[in-house]
Image (cartoon, rainbow, N blue to C red):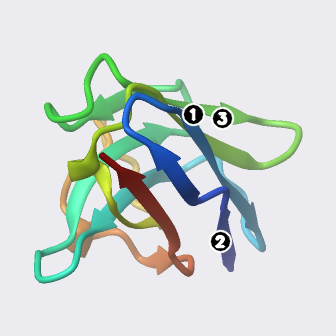
Amino acid sequence: VQLQASGGGLVEAGGSLRLSCAVSGFSLDDYAIGWFRQAPGKEREFVAAIRWSGGMINYADSVKGRFTISRDNAKNTVYLQMNSLKPEDTAVYYCAADGVLRRVPSTHDLEYDYWGQGTQVTVSS
């Protein structure tokens, strides 16, 4: 089971980035893929998640209306489109997989079994 996150970088406030999470090694039908982030000195926090089957989506309030999570079935990849970025979005972003089929994707990091390496997002003011 592998998750590979990419797409981070340095962007000015108001700019956009698209993160990708390529998943391999298991069938995604019963999984949800989530994005979390961790800023220096802060706890890891939920950003967004999508259930592979049915496409149910969940967002943190802090990113609603600015971030969009989506999936590409053919590429086994989940994307996080981040628009109107703010300095407070600066963090290391991680993607993770939850193998328990839930009606709504979980916001709790402890319920995610598999994690990719992080990708740094830095938003300058």
Q: Earlier in the sequence, mark 1 or mark 2?
A: 2
Q: Secondary structure at mark 1?
A: loop
Give the left or right position of residue 4, taking residue 59 as reference.
Answer: right
Q: Residue at x 49, y 32 (%)?
A: 15
Amino acid type, label 1:
Ser
Q: Earlier in the sequence, mark 3 or mark 1?
A: 1
- In the picture, the disc for residue 3 is 2
- In the picture, the disc for residue 53 is 1
Amino acid type, label 3:
Arg
Hey, which quadrant is residue 25 in on the image?
Answer: bottom right
Q: Residue at x 66, y 34 (%)?
A: 71
Q: Secondary structure at mark 2?
A: strand
If the image is split into quadrants, where does the N terminus sit?
A: bottom right
Gap in angstroms between the C-alphas marked 3 and 1: 10 Å
- In the picture, the disc for residue 71 is 3
Circle 2 packing at 10 Å, graded few (<14), some (14-19), many (20+), is many
